[in-house]
Amino acid sequence: MARVCSIRGSKVRVGRKIHRSGLAKKKGGIGRHVTKTVKRKVSPNLHTKRVWVPELSKYVRVKASSEGD
């Protein structure tokens, strides 16, 4: 199954992280330098919940994000 919240519809997004190289001045280096940005995935905080559906008279498993609980 995909990592998508069935309530809010939030899904995996693409973000960026700043890539730094070099040793900090406090540690005896010449300082940190920003060289590039690196892609990364930002996943939603998903939980599997069992929800009772009276019309079906049974439990249904739902993937819900923590904001959609």
Image: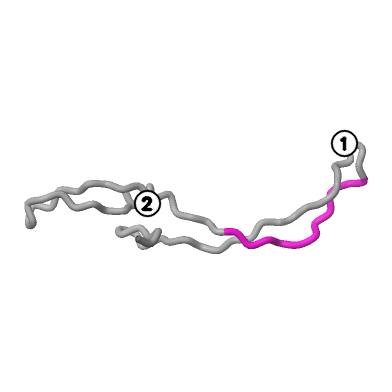
Does residue 52 appear left or right of residue 48 in this picture?
left
Query: Which residue is pictured at 48% across the width and 55% down the height?
Result: 43
Does residue 35 appear left or right of residue 44 in this picture?
right
Q: Which residue is the extreme one toward the top?
A: 27
Percent position of residue 45, x then y = 43, 49
Cα gap from disc 2 to disc 1, whole angstroms: 41 Å
Which residue is nearer to you in this view: 40 or 67? 40
Residue on which disc 2 sits: 65
Query: Which residue is pictured at 19% across the width and 52% down the height?
Result: 60
Rendering quarter of residue 28: top right
Residue on which disc 1 sits: 26
Colour pattern of the rendering:
one colour
Secondary structure beneath disc 1?
A: helix
Indicate the quadrant containing the N terminus: top left, top right, bottom left or bottom right.
Answer: bottom left
Rendering quarter of residue 5: bottom left
59 w.r.t. 4: above or below: above
Which span of residues is magenta-colored?
A: 30-40
Graded by Cα atoms within 10 Å as few (under 14), some (14 to 19) or many (20 or more), the crowding at tag 2 reads: many
